Amino acid sequence: MKRYLLFVSCFFVVFLSNAQNSNYSPHFGIKKKAELPEVFINGTIHVNENTIIENGILIVKGNRIIEMGKNISIPKGAIIHDLTGQFIYPSFIELYSDLNISKEKSKEKLKNPQYKTSKKGPYHWNEAVRPEYNAIDNVKLVYNEIETFLKKGYGMVLSHQKNGIVRGTGSLHLLGKSSNSKILLDKAANFYSFNKGNSNQAYPTSLMGSIALLRQFFIDSKWYEKNNLNNHPKINLSYEAHVSNKKYPNIFVLDRKLDLMRASKVSEESGIDFIYKGSGKEYENIEQIKSISPKLIIPLDFPKPMDLENPYDAISVSTSDLSHWKYASLNIATLEKENISFCITSENLKSKVFFKNIQESLLSGAKKEKILYALTELPAKWLGIDSICGTINKGKLANFLITDKELFTKDFKILENWVLGKQEFKSITNSKDLRGNYKLITGNNEKKLLISGSIDKPKAELKFRILKDSLLNGRPVISPSGDFVKIKSEKTVKVNFSLYENNVTISYSEGDNLIRLNGKIENDGQKWNGEGRDKYGEWFNWKAEKSKVLTITKTDTASKKIIKKKFIKNKHLDFCPSEQAELSNVLFENATIWTADHLETFKGKLWIRDGKIIDVGENIDLGNYNNVKVIDLEGKHITPGIIDEHSHIAIQNGVNEGSNAVTSEVRIGDVINPEDINIYRQLAGGVTSAQLLHGSANPIGGQSAIIKMRWGQTAEEMKIKTAPKFIKFALGENVKQSNWGWRYSIRYPQTRMGVEQIYYDAFIEAKEYQNKIDDFNNLPKKVKVKKIEPKKDLQLEALSEIINEKRFITCHSYIQSEINMLMKMADSMGFKINTFTHILEGYKVADKMKAHGVGASTFSDWWAYKYEVRDAIPYNACLLSQMGIVTAINSDDAEMGRRLNQEASKAIKYGGCSENEAIKLVTINPAKLLHIDDRTGSIKKGKDADIVIWDHSPLSVYAKVEQTYVDGRLLYDYIIQEKLFEENQKNRSNIISEMILAKKNGAQTQRIKKQDNKLHKCNEFEIDE
Amino acid sequence: MNKAISILFIIISWISGIAQITPAEIQKENILLHGGILHKGDGKIIKNSAIGFEKGLISELMDLDQDTIDSSKYNVIINIAGQDVYPGFIAMNSTLGLMEIGAVRATKDYRETGNFNPNSRTLTAFNTDSRITPTVRSNGILLGQISPRGGLISGTSSVMRFDAWNWEDAVVKADEGIHMNWPISRINRTGASEAEIKKTKTKVRTLKVEIYNFFNRSQAYCEGTSFGIVDLKMEAMKGIFLGSKRLYIHANEVSQIKEIIEFKKEFKIQKLTLVGGRDAHYIAELLAENDISVIIKRVHSLPKYKQSELDISYRLPSILFKSKVLFCFDNQGDMEQMQSRNIPFLAGTAVAYGLPYEEAIKALTSNCAKILGIEKYGTIKKGMSATLFVSKGDALDIISNKLSYAFIDGKKIDLSNEQEKNYIKYCKKYGIVPKP
């Protein structure tokens, strides 16, 4: 490939010499060519978003602007461009694209999973991490793609390979039609994402895995920079590259809205300042985003309306998709309002859609100056090249646009796009509006010529009068004179019409005669004339004259006023109020109160205030408080909020990091999805807290998150701040991949023997790691400085927390042998297992569990779904409880989670637990297992006001939740829920009608996007490829 | 007496250890259940009842508040005062006995390969010695419609009793219905290309055409007389057109259900039941008009859509009841075999969400019998099969569903199961008094 670099890899001082002089390739043909200045006069120059010079003069020589202003003398021998009535703008800069880069394709699926990297050499161990990759090494020009960008008004594009988690560097390309790729910066920015791209390597399988991989990579890279570069002989090309590219800006590509907060945490930890390519849905959680004041690159791909005329189809569309269709155009205005700095990407958008969406944004309240800034000066600043581009100033690169009207106004057109002082794009479509009615005169004949369609693609029709036999009942009418009666009738004929600059060609049939006309259009477009020839070869003259201007009936977007759309917080979610519920100050009277505490169950009073349980008992003294709301709950029951020890709801993109056998570095806490409707559904079942667990795909899984169902709040706000750290372990069939299919038969372990060894191996390593760190920390300061600090390892750190009893284990378990094994392993390593979850054969080793001091969290009655649960019994919970083991009943299932009260009652049916014991199985006992019993799990003075009001005994199948309070806030109420449902239905049907209207008004539609609800299992006959 | 029998019962179970549950002997003695609260299964209730049965059939039924009974002809009189009596519950669309362990392929016998299998019969594959069944019947489920899965036409179901030596012994009604899955395209997930969607849509359309062709062929074969050869599939389909077999079509979405209604008309199918019907509440009246009964998708399900009413699955039975649709409960789904024991609690939840109690009982008994065409079962009336059970309390509520007796065709069945035996075994180890 022929390529010359105008300038390479200098970050601050960029000097561009004359392109012709620095050409390294040999010359073909005549060498000498004069370089004449190009002068643009009489145009309105938009220097930047704020400064406008009317009747300005712009002088370009070579690739630079050499003069710009009002009173400038025009050099002699210059080419003059008269831009009367036209406008000059700096050209745009795209930051998120893979233009000019040869795209990497997806790899073939392998026979077995691939656990190690397939990339040979001293590189990072994971294929998705490739900081050594440089887009510049894979340049491939596709001219029609370049053309698309030129048409959109771009002069420069930052391109990178959209593949991998650490994607390497992108290069900054100047756009042009010549066969030489002009590159302003060979390395302009580093790129990152959470998407592993085409890597076939197993790790990571989940979003939390991607996050962990990236965190560890940044730690490693820093350590490498500090220690390896100077001290160590070993070279790793990935880290070498990353360290040496540190100086470039870092761009983090995100697709999901919630990933922004996740990436910002990585930024905080690593100290790297990212520019984030966002989702376009920033307006939905703007308050949160405001708090981190990020730099954003915002896409403008607004969704098209869906075809929802069939009301049954509309059922399957999610409220958030409906809502985003309506409010997407608010995004930019919202960001402006909150003073968040943003650039705009038009990646994958055609120019028509791009400008249409900008206009929509303007109608929704965005300012055009800000949009211009976001497309020109700001991206230049972020790339550190604002000294040479981004505005129209003397000395800068001659990258500019010429438009016919002001930028972004209705029907404005980019007439020319100049890059490096060369006209790289010129609008060749006919800009004259020829539409209208013409009188066409051919010889003696007069016809009506109608030009309609769009300005760019006019269509023509011909109307002429003919004489026709008059018909009555299908028969010709004959006059008294015996002649056929003729009537005049107007006939419309389709016309082939083509236009090339001012040259027009028309052909049509008149009877059996074929007429061909060719001629020219006068400058004003009003008069056309030329010569024609008919079927018989006769030549004749013709002319056409415009009679009147065709009025355009189509609705005019520019005439629309600014639409006062307002996005109300949480409106995109179902059943989610926009405002947080207040702290209740309520005295409940006459209720049957199940305290799950030493008071057991009694009829009495309960007072909650300021998020806490103030008092509970038969009589309560309100003291001086007289604004307490008193609620009579005669016949009703109150229980503590239900706690689910084992839940997988509200987790985004992967519950399992199902790759390596040990993944203690991944954290559910990174990927909580606070918008999961199942949070609200759990509230409707009386659940107020839960442990969100990693799956059971590996012996050592990921770290869990313990949350309260604070519906409507952010992911961070849902976490119980005081809850201790937990981690998921797993045993048995899942970790030895017994039921994963034939492909999965190569990972260690494949047997229960191997599972044990994985644990010993991991914990022995963790101990060594801990020792190394302790040894280093204990060194005297002076010695420390000279020594290499051991590298932080997220995986081993989590394991050493376990050894130091700073992190608790919840272990998925079934068979007695492995339960026993894990306890013995832990004993030998000097720590305890906190909880065995599922623990279906726990009853077989209850005495050993008691001795170890481990708790149990089990299913009420599940069994027979795999071989290892063939001996499970529903009496397990009751028996373990009777053996003095802290026992809970969990769900592991979003549906059952909302009926845990029913599940608890199975301990009464199977094994005869008392009612008080049964309610504890889903309240105080799981609280104890999670070490949050100091603040929730029972109704006790001083604890959080997490309570549930039931219409029946909570252990009855007939019990329904009437209200659920979390931290003293009423987050679920049966009546309010009905109202929210109604409101939501109204909101949905309003948007649906707007969509149908939009379609009627000619908007392009997209196919129906059905909600995907992965938790739901269907038994329909499915076709899915 | 009641206590004595129970204690004896427990001792027998202890002695028998963990051996397989033994099927009960044929009823020899005349039995009288005295004083129970009788839920007849037809919507009526007798608060103080006497139920007598001989040779497997109910011979006498009496309201003790109105009449007195001559108990001299009964050699076993069981006092069940204060306890509830129900007709044996029926598990509809069940795969009990067709699978033992979900993750072990060798134990799965419910899905044949291929798209059209009307001739594969669950009857002979039914395992009477399943370890799961005893845990199910000890909660009151005494009969089941054992149904195949998969393909377009999955196969033929039979009604079985849950106490038998072998399948011949177990069968209540052989080959009573054919199960079919109505095709649906679900490729609309994000990321699918237009071409993929088009391909799938065409495929679904092709499947529908195949169904129509298959039924056309079946109808023609049914009307013909002799073809010289026996077409197994066509033979199996005959009953659908003759009215001797019921067609069960599995579908959940409105568009599917509407297509099914057209299909029913087109082929004049007399007996048609919808299985699933998750979205049936949108068109309940239409179902009633067209005489389509529904085996309602597992009540304990999450709503399909995020914006759906939270409790729509819980309320669906009461909605269909109000619209006069004949319905019963389905339990198909995750771990459906072991979950069969929770079928009474599906009904319990439906009651909590508006279904009248006795209607819930009907949906577990006589409604099923009506759909299945097993006239002798489903209600407790004179002349009906003595297939019933006695619970110490409300059988639809978990805490009170405690069976003291169960009879299938008058045979008093063993209510223990292996799980209970394992429990007792470990109670002994730890010195805990078991409360089975």
Image: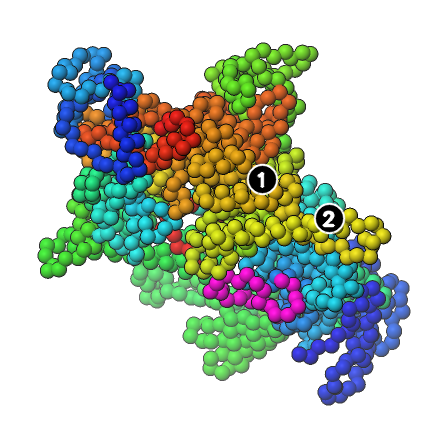
Q: Quick one: quadrant of the C terminus of chain A?
A: bottom left
Residue B73 in sight: yes
- Residue A105 shown in magenta: yes
Query: Which range of residues does the magenta coloring cover?
Result: A102-125
Is A375 in front, or is A919? A919
Q: Amino acid at mark 1?
A: Lys
- According to the picture, the residue beneath numbered tag 2 turns out to be A774
Q: Is residue B84 above or below residue A69?
A: above
Residue at the image position 72 percent from the left and 42 percent from the top:
A291
Q: Is residue A39 above or below residue A705?
A: below
- According to the picture, the residue beneath numbered tag 1 turns out to be A832
Residues at marks 1 and 2 on the same chain? yes
Q: Earlier in the sequence, mark 1 or mark 2?
A: 2
* Residue A132 coordinates in the image, percent (x, y): 68, 66
Residue A891 in sight: no
- SS state under label 2: helix
- SS state under label 1: loop
Q: Quick one: quadrant of the N terminus of chain A?
A: bottom right
Q: Is residue A742 left or right of residue A560?
A: left
* Residue A898 coordinates in the image, percent (x, y): 48, 33
Residue at the image position 45 percent from the left and 50 percent from the top:
A733
- Residue A238 shown in magenta: no
Residue at the image position 47 percent from the left and 16 percent from the top:
A635
Q: Is residue A701 above or below residue A348?
A: above
* Residue A739 coordinates in the image, percent (x, y): 43, 52
Occupied quadrant, residue A449:
bottom right
Q: Amino acid at mark 2?
A: Asp
* Residue A123 coordinates in the image, percent (x, y): 65, 66
Q: Is residue B352 left or right of residue A695?
A: left
